[in-house]
Structure formats: structure tokens, C-alpha cells
Image (cartoon, rainbow, N blue to C red):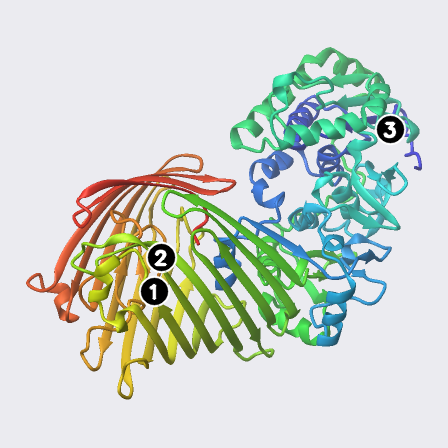
Amino acid sequence: MDSVHRFAGRPTVALVLSGGGAKGAAEVGVLRYIEEQKIPVDLVLGTSIGGLVGALYSLGYNADEIQYLFQNQDWNMILSDVVDNRYYCYERKRYNDRYLISIPFHYEKRSHKSGDTDSGQYTSSDGLLHIGASDEEAREKVVNNSFASSLPSGIAYGFNVNNLISSLTVGYQDSISFADLPIPFACVAADVVSCKAKNWGSGSLKTAMRSTMSIPGLFNPVRTEGMILVDGGTRNNFPTDLAKAMGADYIIGVDLSDIDPDYTQVNNIGDVLMQFITMLGKDAFNKNVVTPDVFVKPSISEYNMMSFSDDAVETMLRRGYEAARREADAFAELKAITGPSTGALSNTKAVDVSKTPVRLEAIVFEGVDDNESRMMMEMVDLDVSETIDRERIDDAMSKLQATGLFDAVTYSLTGSGEPYRLVFHCTPAPVHRLGMGLRADTEDWASLLFNVGLNVNKMMGSTLNIEGRLGQSQSLVARYSYGSMNLPMVNAELSLGHYRGRLSGIYDNKVNEYVSYLSHTESVFISSRDWARADVKLGLRNRGFVLPVDSHFGNQLDQLSSSMLRGDYVGPFFNVNVYTMDDAYFPTHGLDLKVDASYDVWKPGSKGFVPIFTSGLNLRFVIPFGTGFAIIPDLDLRSVVDHNSMDNYSISHRNTIGGAIRGRYLDQQIPFLGINNTYLVSYDHLAVASIDFRIKMAEDFFITATGSVMRDSDNFIGLVDPRQGELHFGTAIQIGYNSIFGPLKANVHWSDISRSFGAYLSLGFDF
């Protein structure tokens, strides 16, 4: 590491900032005090979050600007690679709403190219299985490579962190000497290959900033120049020795570590990770901690590396300032030696594109071919003729990431000045995904949902998805989709199911017993492309349904016609689904719209064709009132038209209500709190209207009051005519908590059909 030049007429002052995750907010408070007292800072060094804060200060951002950045970021999103739900296609939204765990994987072992990590490229010894891989290539990967070798090396790739850094370093985004920054800078990462520290003093500033805060296990490590870099705190969390080596005469050190925490202070993954990093770098820390001429130690031991809440950040900012003020005498002595700071920077301040839009000369996509690049260009909706800011870039980034085509997408603005080249670095996606959902409730007890998605050619829409469910009810669904660039996808789907649950309302509402039944569906249809916000399907299907005579109904079942107990139908179907809700379980805005229709031909026991037409509509939307209260109306309409007026068609067509989960036991099942399991209503035309009054009591904690009304009739007009059909109502009070294991819901309900109070408890996503 080269030494920095000495400043004429006075000693060189270095500011050294330790790592500590969210605790870095306290370092910003220290910066505020240093600026107020006009203490000169000639060199900044940092590790982990100290590397981020220090780099921003070196780029010319003052304490006010860095504080604003700390307090106005969605850190949960930045640290977790989360993409806002509105960018996902319909299928991906529904996938996220069902699966607790989703693991991407490749068939091939990855061997990364040496070079800058921003390229985002990797190869394998026998060639890359890219998003346009041939069928032959795909089969070879299946046979020759393992699943375990393809698992990610961190919970998050870190593309949101990359993008944040890119937006703040414009003007210094190319390979540079860090001595040429407005304030000279250095930071520390750790190379897991050599087990040595990597002291960054030149190269890609963005790569240096990303690597120094690459927490092992949380973020993928940074691969560059033959090194695999992780958080520098594992080797040197307080690099005062590096400051001395670079020519510092006086050192101001800010320490955020808890070397000897109390037993009660290590409680969660953030605490454990922080102590793991501290443990690995303890020897270096003990050596360096005695070096600073001014030592600032904020009192923030009750916080951890993930304490990014508004209150926590505000408190740590204040305590950092107070800790610096406690060292007022030491700062005064230093200022007496060096003289006051003029505040002048040695070079131009970096551009923050969130505040200062920039002009472009070109938009480039790396990691895709020319055809894919043209498709991506249409998707991002950007134009080189206009200025662009961080909001527009983040919007484009989210669109690309939400497609599922890429493992990660990052960007950089290259060039010495305006106009810049906007380069999107696209890492080919894990072409396959393994999903798992878990659920436990008082109705169906424990259930497991799993999914294996195999993508032969994701860009063109060639996929195979296999989904299975285990529990009291079991099912298996296999779907193959094939599509071309701009045309709808062609799908073939096969499903088999064995379901077990309570079924009532069949025979004068006297039957309320467990029954088991079998179903199967074979279909061929066309659908909208994966990235469409609406899901549209049109096709032909065959559906079979069998309720065995030996069910628990006993002799009562004998009084039902065989046509009710079994069915085999073939015919066209059509459905449209529009889903814009930000959350399926506790939404704050958006709507969920479903429209479907089918024209089925009933085959067994009929003389010729006996068509049955079914149609349905479901509309659910959110009316928000501030941040804590929302009204959520829900309307269902469903009609069955038997053109032969036989009224004894299969149970699989009859209008059905009950339970909390739509389509749990029968595809047409409409939720109705107040009735557990399923209830077959009497007539062919059905309307169910519900309204939720939901109050947010605390973070992720909700109370909901629900009222539901059901009316059925033998004709559609009768749904609004109180003289026809039947009218029933139900109500429920529900407590909900959005846990890390999925939504936790508990309710007490009543209806005039059951005429009794019931309770329902569930944990996990609905399936």
C-alpha cells in the first residue's frame, strides 16, 4: 500500500472506522462532531460498514448527506436482494405466496473468471449452461453435475448493495487510485483463498466497498483477480496499522465492536455473525486498538449489526456524536497541532444520481446475446436521449431481476464524465429452482408443499415444473411449458390428487363426515408469457372426479346418484388473473381479480353430449386509510348452467363454500369463515360477499374483523331478489402475525349454517 503525501506545514490526520453493520450510524454522528469542530481529515480508512461510511466521506459526502442516506434507505430490501412485489409476474407472485424456502441451483460446478466482479460472469470446465442452452446441453448437465455444487455461497447475492454503491460513486466508478478521491481512502477485505487481508488502495472503488462489507454467509463473496473476498473484519476490523503504514501522523479511531459481550447480548443471527467476525479478527484488533491518538467508543452495546430500525439509527447517531464530544479535550489538542480544517476537497465530489440526473450516450447489456439484449432494452423502457436518475435505474433493475432470467443484475455508469455509458451486468440465472412450503393448521394438520422447476430455455419459456403436496391430502402436478420469443406459451399439464376432508350439505345438511376422493386433470392450453402482469389461459382439458362408495357416509351415500359421485368431463376453458397486491396475506394496496369460464361435456351415464357451463368471478381489493387501517372487500360470483336441467351433475361442479383457503379441497371452493372444511350449497347460482376491517396494531401484527354474506338461487336474478334462494351469513375475529415462517393466523368464527362457534389456527402459507 502506497503512502499518502504529507500536507505542507502540518501533520497528516487519518480517520479509522471499524465495522459493525447498522452500528455504523454512530460513526456518522462522530463525523458530524468532527465537521462542527473543523478537525482536519486527510486520510480515511475503514472496514465493513466503516468502509462504506468512510468511502462516502472520502467521495465528498458530508455528515448530513450520509445521515440522510442512513435514514432513508429500505435496509431490509438492500440487505436481502428483495425485489418489490409489483415487478413480479403473476406466476412468480403466486410462487412467492406459497413457498417458504426457494433455493436456486445449477447443474454445473461454477468456476469464476478472474477479473472485476462487476462482470458477473462465470464459466464451467465443460461450458456454461446459459439461459439459451440447447436440449442436448441441458441433458448433459443433468447427468454429469451435482445439485450440491451449485448452491449459492451466501443468502443474498448483494445486487441491491451493488446498485446503491453504483448510484453514489458516479465520477469515480472506473479503476482509479484511491489517493485521487476528494479525500484519500483505503479499506480492508479478507481473501479466503490466501487467508490474508486485502488492503484496497486502488482499482474499482465499487468492488472494494462491496467486498469490505461482504459478511460471510449473508452475502456472496466478491470474486476478483483470483481472490474470493469477504468482510474485512475477519482479518482487520480496526486498521490503524494500515493508517500508520500510509503515513498518518495522528489517528482518530472510532470503534463499534463488542469484544467481550455479555451472555445476554448474543441473541440472534446478527449478534452471532458480528461476534464471529470479531472473534476471527480479535488478535489484530487488540494490537491496533492502542494506536489511536483520539479514541472514540460509542455506547451502543444493546444494538447489533441488523439494528436498522428508525429509532435505533436515530439513537446511534446521537450516541456517536456524544461519544465524540466526550473526547473534546483530545480533539482540541489535535486541532491545536494541525490547525482548523478549511473544508476544501482535493478533488471533485462524486455525483449522487438520486439527486442529480445524468446524461447517457449508450445502454449496454453484458451477459446476454444480441437478441436477448434487444428484448431487455424493450423491457427496461429507457432512452439514451433523456437524462436518468437512480429511481429510473432502480425501476429498470427491478424489472430485469423480477423476470427470474438472471442470478443477479447490477449496473455501472462508465466513462470519465457525461454522457455516461449505462452498463447492466447480467449474471445468467440459476436455471433451476427448488421450493418448499410448510403449513400446520387445525383443519388439515401438517402439510408439506414442494416444487422442482427445471428451465431448459428460460428466455424462450421452455420449463418443466413439478409440484407435490403431502399431508392428509396429497397431490402431484406436472406442467411443461414451451414458448417462443414473442408468442404465448404452449402448456401441457397433468395433475393427480387424493383429498380427504369434511364434506357437508350433500344430503339435507345432515352429512358432516370425513370423505376421501380422487381427481385427475389433463389439459393443453396457451398462456401469457412469464413476465406478464396478468395471467391469461385458454385451452382444452379433461377432468375426472371419483368419490368412492365406501366413504364414511354409509347408507346415506346410496341415496345419491352415481353422477354426483363421479364425473369425467372434457371441454374448453378460459381464465384471467390480475394480481397487483403487495402482499397476499396482509396487503396494504392492490387488487386480486379472477375471471374463469368452462364448457364441459359430461360423458358417463349420459346419452350423447350433456354440456355444463360454469363461470366465476372473484374481486378482492384494498381500501387503505393511512398506514394502520384498511378495508378489504371481497366478492365472489359463480354460476352453473346444466343445459339439460338434470341437476345431478358431479360434486366437482357444484357450488361450494367453506374454510379459509380458496380451492383447498375442490377447485371451486369459495372461502367462508364460519364454516370449516367444505359445504355444498343448494342452488346453481351463488354470490358471496365479505368485507375485512383490518387494524395494524404493531409491526407485522394485525387484528381483522370479517363479515360475510352468502346467497344462492336457482337463477341469476334471484341473487338480488330476497324472495328467492337462501341467505346465510357468517362472521369472524382474527389475529394475524406476519412471521418468518409465514403468516400466523388465529380466528374465532360463527355462521347461521353451523349455528355454533368455531376456532381456526394456522401457521404457514396457504396451499
Q: Counting other residues with Cα less than 10 Å from the Cα at mark 1, is it few (<14), some (14-19), or many (20 or more)?
A: some
User: Which SS class for mark 3?
Assistant: helix
Report x, y in % for residue 36. 67, 24
- Most extreme residue toward the left is 723
Q: Counting other residues with Cα less than 10 Å from the Cα at mark 3, is it few (<14), some (14-19), or many (20 or more)?
A: many
Confirm whether residue 305 shows in the render.
no
Pointer 1 residue: 548
- Counting residues from the N terminus, which is met first, the one under dot 1 or under dot 3? 3
Pointer 3 residue: 243
Q: Quadrant of residue 667?
A: bottom left
User: In the rendered structure, which amino acid carries the disc numbered 1?
Assistant: Pro
User: Quick one: quadrant of the C terminus?
Assistant: bottom left
Report x, y in % for residue 348. 76, 45
Q: Nearer the viewer, mark 1 or mark 3?
A: 1
Marks 2,3: beta carbons within 8 A: no
Instruction: Determine the CA span between mark 1 and mark 2.
Output: 24 Å
Q: Is residue 364 above or below residue 224?
A: below
Pointer 2 residue: 662
Q: Nearer the viewer, residue 1 or 190?
A: 190
- Counting residues from the N terminus, which is met first, the one under dot 1 or under dot 2? 1
User: Which SS class for mark 1?
Assistant: loop
In-image side of 481 versus 604 (left or right)? right
